Image (cartoon, grey):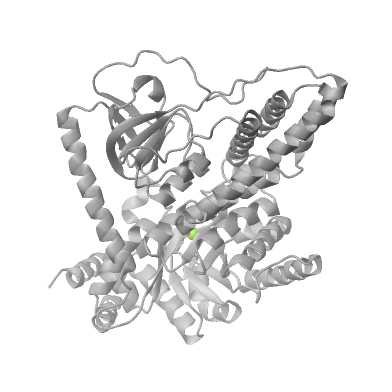
Amino acid sequence: MNQPRQRATRPRAQPPAGELALEGIAASPGIAIGHAHLHVPGEIQVAERQLRAVEVAPEVERFRAAVARALQQVARLRAKGSRLPAAAAEEIGFLLDAHVQMLSGSRLVRGVEARIADGLVNAEAAVQQETSAIARSFAAMDDAYLAARAQDVRDVGERLLRCLTRARLRAFSDLPEGTVVLAADVTPADTALMDPGRVAAFACEAGGMEGHTAIVARSLGLPAVLGVAGLVDAASPGDRVVVDGSAGRVVLRPTAATLAGYERRRMEFRRGERQLRRIARLPAVTRDGVAIGLQANLESPRDAEAARLHGADGVGLLRSEFMFMNRDDVPGEDEQYEALARVVRALEGRPATIRTLDVGGEKLASALGPRFAPGPNPALSLRAIRLGLREPGLLETQLSAILRAGAHGPVRILLPMISHLHEVQEVRAILGRVQRRLLRRGVAMADPAPPLGAMIEVPAAALAADGLARACDFFAIGTNDLTMYALAIDRADEQVAHLYNPLHPAVLRLIQFTTEAALRNRIPVSLCGEIAGDPRYTALLLGLGIRDLSMAPLKIPRVKGRVRAIDLAAAAEAARAIMAQHDPVRIASMLDAFNAPA
Ligand code: PEP
Ligand code: MG
């Protein structure tokens, strides 16, 4: 018979004595020192029993009563979850919605009933067999998202078994303050039950960075290390333990010297957090009172929480490539919509600028298959919007997903690597078609239509910015590629890396020209290349007229600190002087002189 789950109780080896450091995945940052609570889920002993025909109907009834009880439990958990911080509440909400769906006449419920009726097995055995079969088929799909769904199925199966056998639910509420929970596995629902006032941190053998458990831990601010091989066998209840969620390390039974080191690092971490929190709440306003927008660049939906934490005004660039990388197929509209809607909802009304697929060149997604093999010069080949217009099906699916995500909050659509006016016009026509189709289908979508903008990252686009500004609703300047294409330097080639310099007057003039064209045509312009997150450039970019900068979330506090120290009138004056220079070395030294504290 199948085991209910792999993490069931197993015989424990004698734990070793003395300090032991174990490595795992740094799933949620922070350092905690406490005493170990070994969380061993009670194994549910289930025997398989053959039913007689007359027993089938009562057994199905018994199973349905267990389903009803499980639904009640989930409703209670939901009410409890709604009192958590917003991001955690939302995450738990999604998870429990999935559990409710599985308990409501789904394949799982129908499958269990069929096994009882046709296979003549008791309800417990039928639940075990059916959940294992579904979970196995998900896990076999070799997709991180679906693998996580397999865990959901197992969780629901375990809940049903508990309801059938009336086994007690595990709780963390009676743990002493400062407990560190160590386990073979911690489910997201377990995590939601952890009271940060009692549980200082947790670590477990299972889990990955993408899982709900890690996400909930991060949003609760609970340090966590996942994927720690051998953890349970190495620990004893009550052991002193350090969980370093920033480095992904668990130290069991630390020596006095190790402990002292971690005490110091814990203080430093807390001090850093306090400083970050203080600056995240302060406005990004220059000394002479001009508000600057600081947005986040997101590589994946996971970063949305960091964006919020670091006080981002929204997302200036969501690189949608994450949905296409490391897989052998192309995500469908629903999958893209789900991922994007999650980000939009997490931003709680702040705008999300979603860039359409930017692959090709150095960013090849295997999902698109061999028909998009790179040309002789990939950086100048079928990249980004060129690919989208060559494969309108791909682009339409993405635009449709973005429009639908826009039903949950403000979105903007950003087109990568625009070099011709007609590219924007073609996308606008496609966007209109996609909108009409959604309207006919009665699907909820962004209303009014989201702004459509262009990345200005090709010198031709910068020099033709006046014309493009009339066709676009906004610009986002991509200095990473703009520098590469202006200077003919491959941004990923270390042999010419010393020549890659955004302070080259050619690059600065392209930024200036684009900014002025946007301002003349009264459309918003932001800058989302790497220099946006480097405080060294802040004064120059503000001096050139940029008022919105988008960067990796972690960089926001430092740039905000710099913004608050800048006098905009003086920065504009410095920018004027710099723009009169021809030598990048001289430009750099003028900038450094301006940045130096008085
Ligand atoms: C850029 O080119 O500056 C940019 C932000 O886009 P990416 O780095 O994704 O090419
Ligand atoms: Mg780019």
Residue that extends furthest to the right in the rendered view of this protein: 53
Q: Which residue is found at the position 72% from the left and 72% from the top?
A: 432
Residue 286 horizontal/vertical position (percent): 28, 78
* Residue 540 visible, this orientation: yes
- Which quadrant holds the C terminus? bottom left
Q: Is residue 326 left or right of residue 527?
A: right
- Using the image, determine if residue 384 lies above or below residue 507: above
Quarter of the image holding residue 410? bottom right
Which quarter shows the N terminus?
Answer: top right
Residue occupying the point 19% across, 33% down = 259
Q: Position of residue 20 (x, y in %)?
A: 28, 23
Question: Given the current orientation, which residue lies at the most extreme left position?
Answer: 598
The answer, for residue 323, to whether it is visible in the render is no
In the picture, measured across the screen, residue 373 lies left or right of residue 564, that is right
Image mark count: 0
Viewed as shown, does residue 444 lie left or right of 416? right
Percent coordinates x, y for residue 589 in the rendering: 20, 67
Q: Position of residue 471 (x, y in %)?
A: 60, 78
**Depth check, front residue: 534 or 36:** 36
In depth, the one of 320 and 9 nearer the eye is: 9
Q: Residue at x 58, y 26 (%)?
A: 5
Q: Is residue 442 above or below residue 141?
A: below
Q: Residue at x 56, y 51 (%)?
A: 78
In depth, the one of 342 and 114 nearer the eye is: 114
